[in-house]
Amino acid sequence: MSMPYIKARIKKLNIETEFVKGTLVDFIFGFIFANAKIFSSFVPFGLSYYAAVFNKTKWNVHFASVVVGTLFSVGFGGGIKYLFPLLLYTAANAFIDIKTTYIKAGIVGCFLFLTNTVSAAFNGFLLYDVVLGICESFIAFVAVFVFESGIDFVKKQSNRTIITSEEFVSVTAIYAISILCLSSVPSFFGINITSVLSITLVMIMCYKSSHGAGAMIGAIVGVINGINNYSMVSVVGSYSLCGLVASVFKNYGRLGVCLGFILANSISTVFLNSSTEILINVFDIFTASLIFLFIPENVITYITSYSKKVMDYETNLKRQSDVSGEIIRKRIKKAKNSFNELSKVCVESDKNKVYTKDELINMFNDVAYKVCTDCAQRHICWQKDYKNTYSQMYNMLEISQEKGAITSQNMPGSFKNKCIKTDAFALAFGFVTERININSMWNLRLVESRKNAANQIVAINDILDEISDDINIFVDTKFEDIIKTELDKRKIKYNYVWVISKSNDKFEITISTKESLETYLIEDAIKSVMDEDIKIVKSALNVYKILPEDKFSIKAHISQKSKDEICGDGYLSVSSKKGHILAISDGMGTGVNAQKESKCAINLLKCFYGAGFNLETSVNLINSHMLNRNGENFTTLDICHIDLNDGTLKFSKTGASASFLKTGIKAEKIYCASHPVGVFEKIDSSVSVRKIKDEACIIMVSDGVYSISDENWIEDEIKKLDFDDVKKVADSILNKAIEKKDGLKDDMTVIAAKISLNV
């Protein structure tokens, strides 16, 4: 036989072994719970277990185990009233798929109450029997919740690393219920085996648990045992006190736990029962203590391992979150006020600098020093008639700014007639005016930088407003733990889970996993605990964001071909909390420079948009950056922002080609003549807004596709195309453009997108 055949046989054998093992475990559990007696002859836990674990693939195993256990415990006469609810519940599941725990518990309670009522009618309809029937039905109702929450962990304890506090309570209750299956065993020398095992369970759990957990464990075991006791309240109180004191004494080892339990029982006997009648038998306690003292440590560790997996809830967590949020909001407000003042300073100084009179006189004196120092007529110009000389120099400054330069020909006539060194004076004055012009140019650049800084500060203030609103959130740690539990059940290893609830009923869940996963695995875990429609966005490596599903969804595809090895077109298609953005940037020219400019514009757009800047501010900041770069390379920027919540489309074009919007059978061309980014200080960006109701298709192209003599061919083409396959649409338009241009003569990029209404 070949090795693949042997491996296949071994794999099949392992699967069959696991199936047999699982079936056997299910049968044993059903048998045990069906034997757990209360009120000396009632066994409702088998029915509750059956309802909690019922599934249509293995229902027969659970059904058989509960039937056998019930008949073994109370016989056919006593078990008939449990067989009818079992059959009725099975029949109900054949017609409807019962999933909600409340419905399961309600059906079980009602069916059991019905059979109890019929049984009471045959026995004379005594009030006592009716009350017992109501109590048993209620216990069966509650037990469904216990088994639903805890039985999965009991069966797969080794595979779990964390459990919720609800599961902890349920598992403890299941352990206590399991002990009740021995309630029919007669006492031996006054020692009750059920009581001994219950006390042993409490001691074991208190030995490894906190004080509060010890009291809770005692209360749970006390409730289960007290059901069969007429002084149930006293028994529950006694077990709770014993559990609390035993856990307090755990620091003194096993002996301390035993002594604490005995001491607490003595106190409860006197103060709770107000008599010398012992609530918990002393012989039972001593026997349980001996078992506890000699039980192996690894057995205790296994039994109590689930208590260490319970997640802690800090009661003041929300208060801490609120206080922290308020402090951060105040600091953000202070920062925002500071930025506002800084913006005002930038705006107020946003004027062309004008030289003062003293500064101009100093410049004029420099000219006089260079030209007039050795002139024979200097005493006439600069002593007798100095006011007129300065006045004429002011006039020459105006002429220089108007004509571009001062010469001996365009000097004022009165000055030219008086000066004997007009050529030398014009040359020296030209140096002064050149310095003034250079200073003015740099001053304009400084003014523009201040404008950009003011715009950025205003944009930062807008972002601070959004951050301040986002701080008004609640970190839902309880739901985080529920999600962690679901991930743990599916053996999904995670780094962290964050659940943020916002004031507008929005939520945001972030899950970081230790390895890359298919999104459907995350979706399956989330949908098992949430009824809302969700979308999953992979925001980073192994980081998944779960958000409420938008009103609209989008699918897009980009097709691109380059004329040379390096493509000068850049593109972007990215989603964020604000929606989805599509963009094409066409770098001027070809080759490395064109690619560098388009890539720079696209990267800046992605950064600004991701940081929270709005569309207009992002374009202005990109233009300022491109303007201040060295060289004279420009780039176009064609952007479409889609708000997936309300269906608003914003088309922003700076030197870009037309885009096309198809709604129904109509196709619209969206175009505006404007300059590329990085050409002028003031950006000439055109924003066109469209609103869609149900479905729309978008085509965006670079200049290489659009610059064909027949401009209407794209409109005609998209009217014929089926946008269900956006890749096919993008490829079709790109290939058609290459065909119309008789080959690939320019870089070409096409974005095809379809926006659909989620139903």
Image: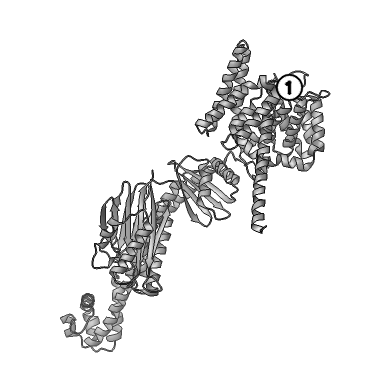
SS at badge 1 = helix
Q: Is residue 216 visible?
A: no
Q: What is the x, y in percent for residue 131?
A: 61, 16
Which residue type does callout 1 highlight? Phe
Please name whichever residue, 207 or 405, is drawn nearer the observer in this view of the structure.
207
Image check: 728 left or right of 66?
left
Q: Please tell me which residue is depicted at 61% across the width and 33% down the height of the picture.
A: 60
Q: How many numbered tags mark residues here?
A: 1
**Residue 457, position as x, y percentages in the image:** 39, 58
Splitting the image into 4 quarters, where does residue 616 fall?
A: bottom left
Mark 1 neighbour class, 10 Å CA radius: few under 14, some 14 to 19, many 20 or more: few
Question: Which percent across, then down, holds residue 106?
Answer: 54, 26
Q: Where is residue 465 shown, x and y percent of the image?
A: 41, 50
At 32% across and 75% down in the image, what residue appears? 438
Residue at (29, 54) in percent of width and height: 662
- Say which residue appears at 46% left-offset and 45% top-offset: 534
Residue denoted by label 1: 271
For the question of whether residue 65 can be seen, the reply is yes
